[in-house]
Image (spheres, helix red, strand yellow):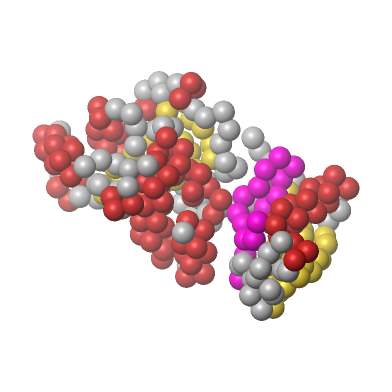
């Protein structure tokens, strides 16, 4: 659902020990938030102030918080926050990301990457029942009974992560994306799966050089097989490979957010 008004809460000043650095920010909506300024009690209080501003129509505010017993935090420093009303959707700066598959892993990847607000995320699956009831802000659902036909609607410079419930769908998407074009493409699965896919893609006439542009396996298998662990590995690899376009500061914030 499009959010028309929100409060951006930015860490403007820190003294002593603090949860986040100056410049860290979060966006607070009437019924949700993205990003983080760290510190559970501090963030809770900041969200309450931001939502009160939305109710009152206030546009700006500045507040200072000692991180001691009053907030139930042991950092011992202090944080100065700026609150600012925004009236339009945040504009992502990165390339579009398409996640093919709204299963446990696809949802987890979207939930990890969406708060960074660096890209518009489209998550695709074959029917509405497979879509979660709620998606993070910035994630657009696309229901396509034939996902291969939906490929044509993706920008040719988009990034893609393929993680559907079906090996046949995964393979069909690899074929369709190679024909369509992409900036990057990652496929979830084992090395054995990818070896088989490579042989089949070669048989369809795709060149080895083009096939090698698809990255498989993705993520970090040492983190385990829990969907959230897979998502952290996939998101970390994705961010590192796109670090040049993110810029140094954004990359550091991104890695901090998923650790």
Between residues 241 and 12, which one lies in front from this camera angle? 12
Between residues 259 and 159, which one lies in front from this camera angle? 259
Q: In this view, does 236 lie above or below 150?
A: below
Residue at image position (25%, 30%) is 167
Residue 127 seen by the camera? yes
Magenta span has 27? yes
Residue at image position (53%, 47%) is 114
- Residue 259 point in image, percent of width and height: 46, 59
Q: Residue reaching furthest right?
A: 56
Magenta stretch? 21-40
Residue at image position (74%, 42%) is 30
Magenta span has 230? no
Q: Residue reaching furthest bottom?
A: 16
Count of number-bearing discs: 0
Residue at image position (45%, 25%) is 130
Q: In this view, does 116 lie above or below 201?
A: below
Rendering quarter of residue 173: top left
Asked whether, in this view, residue 22 is left or right of residue 238, the answer is right
Between residues 86 and 128, which one lies in front from this camera angle? 128
Q: Which quadrant of the rendered structure holds the N terminus?
A: top right
- Residue 128 point in image, percent of width and height: 49, 22
Residue 254 seen by the camera? no
- Residue 21 point in image, percent of width and height: 61, 71
Rendering quarter of residue 127: top left
Asked whether, in this view, residue 46 is left or right of residue 57, the answer is left
């Amino acid at each position: 659902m499009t959010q028309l008004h929100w409060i951006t809460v930015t860490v403007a000043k820190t003294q002593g020990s603090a949860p986040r650095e100056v410049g860290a920010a979060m966006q607070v909506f009437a019924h949700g938030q993205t990003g983080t300024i760290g510190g559970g009690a501090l963030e809770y209080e900041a969200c309450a102030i931001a939502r009160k501003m939305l109710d009152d129509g206030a546009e700006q505010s500045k507040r200072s918080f000692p991180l001691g017993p009053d907030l139930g935090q042991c950092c011992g420093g202090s944080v100065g926050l700026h609150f600012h009303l925004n009236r339009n959707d945040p504009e992502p700066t990165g390339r579009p990301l398409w996640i093919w598959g709204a299963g446990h892993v696809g949802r987890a990847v979207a939930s990890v990457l969406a708060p960074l607000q660096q890209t518009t995320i489209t998550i695709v699956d074959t029917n509405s029942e497979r879509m979660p009831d709620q998606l993070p802000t910035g994630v657009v659902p696309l229901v396509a009974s034939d996902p291969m036909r939906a490929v044509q609607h993706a920008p040719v410079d988009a990034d893609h992560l393929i993680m559907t419930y079906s090996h046949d769908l995964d393979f069909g998407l690899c074929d369709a994306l190679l024909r369509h074009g992409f900036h990057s493409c990652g496929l979830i699965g084992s090395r054995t799966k990818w070896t088989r896919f490579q042989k089949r893609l070669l048989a369809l006439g795709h060149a080895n050089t083009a096939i090698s542009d698809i990255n498989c396996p993705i993520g970090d298998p040492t983190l385990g097989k829990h969907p959230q662990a897979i998502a952290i590995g996939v998101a970390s690899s994705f961010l590192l490979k796109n670090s040049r376009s993110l810029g140094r500061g954004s990359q550091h914030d991104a890695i901090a957010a998923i650790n």
